[in-house]
Amino acid sequence: MSLVWRQVRRALCLETSSSRILKMCPSLSLGASWASVNKFDLHTKPRMPPCDFSPERYQSLAYEHALEIHRQHLSPVATAYFQKPLLLHQGHMEWLFDSEGNRYLDFFSGIVTVSVGHCHPGAYHGCSPYTLGLTNIRTFKTKLLTGMGCQSTMCPDVFRGPWGGSHCRDSPVQTIRKCSCSPDCCQAKDQYIEQFKDTLNTSVSSSIAGFFAEPIQGVNGFVQYPKGFLKEAFELVRERGGVCIADEVQTGFGRLGSHFWGFQTHDVLPDIVTMAKGIGNGFPMAAVVTTQEIAKSLAKCLLHFNTFGGNPIACAIGSAVLEVIKEEKTQENSQEVGTYMLQKLAKLRDEFDIVGDVRGKGLLIGVEMVQDKMSCQPLSCEEVNQIHEDCKDMGLLVGRGGIFSQTFRIAPPMCITKPEADFAVEVFRSALIQHMERKAK
């Protein structure tokens, strides 16, 4: 979240290199199981749920040739998650297939972009699924700089921040930190609001332009604020003449389950809402919604327009995605399956000392890895990389986030089922056991 006022240069570099690779057994058979070079002594390998879709045979560039083209002609900034990048060839709903026919359960949706499923047959009115092909699966991280005139304020993180406890956030799963908050009062919220007031009083001018906030922070690892924080923050901003902007790029379109928009979970009404990603289910489109008063103010500018605004293909696709969300009740599915998976992941947190926090709502879930629960120091990037690789080699794709890339981000297409959630949790548990076995040697 940031206040528009002063230039602050801050870079966030998420390292995603991994230390080694496990081999995979390619298979095109339905319900294929996966094998790695590791042998499990204490557990059995999770069995992948069946899939009734058979991918077409890959007939394009050889894997090494594709990598060589990337090295020679593409920006070196774009870094793939895995040491041996996946050459993904085709997608179907929650499933992805690589060039060798290996099947993966996608639990990151192209950085929370695919809302109702890869190549959903009903979500592309006006645009062929063959034209779009595999929708938005390339995950990479770059350095991010704040814009001109922006001042950041402290992130009100009830797990990693200075204040927070076991009753502070709007989630089926709370942090393991204890607090003495009463049901109608959050002490952490009051502390963070005081810090926010201090930022307003000492670091910005008496009049501000606006305040940006995600209802749940995305790239930072799906961080949730204490209940009531955003509502009071909006009030303070409006007292200084600023407008309040909600960034719903990752939280919108029913992904949180309980509400269609993330800002609704905070009981606020923004002046401007930005949205993208899930609105097009992988098709590149975005939208801005605002009040009539603010929209009219743009007419006072010398020139304001959008070259591709109102593109008919984008509008047709966006409308079709909204129809699918409504007809297939994906918001309700996010609530049911997401809550189910959060509660199962919370059991892993209680079982493993390196799982520091499980948080989120619906199908926007963060699992933060730590050295131990006492210190809550981030688990080393090398160790997180290896757990990430192990998940991939068992057929599960998840994202990463957090300042130290220590948080696994789980945001699958909203069409997933409970058996697939069970598989994902079992894969993650197996990867954690493998990690503990390596540490014990």
Image: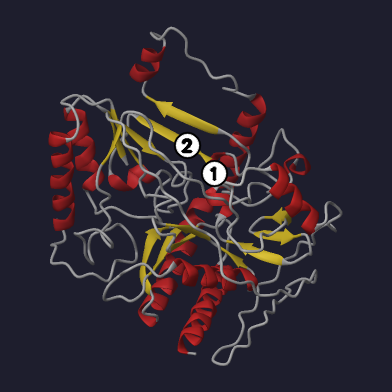
| Residue 406: % across, % down | 42, 63
Give the CA separation, mark 2 to mark 1.
8 Å
* Depth check, front residue: 220 or 190: 220
Three-letter amino acid code at disc 2? Met
> 32 left or right of 196?
right
| Residue 183: % across, % down | 16, 61
Instruction: Estimate how packed mark 1 is, as few (under 14), some (14 to 19) or many (20 or more) residues with alpha carbons within 10 Å.
Output: many
Residue 363 seen in render: no
Label tally: 2
| Residue 9: % across, % down | 35, 38
Write the residue at 53% across / 77% down. Answer: 431
Write the residue at 52% across / 50% down. Answer: 141
Q: Are dots 2 and 1 in contact, CB under 8 Å? A: yes
Which residue is at the far front? 72
Q: Which mark is residue 306?
A: none
Instruction: From this view, report whether residue 362 is shown above or below residue 309.
Output: below
Write the residue at 42% across / 69% down. Answer: 380
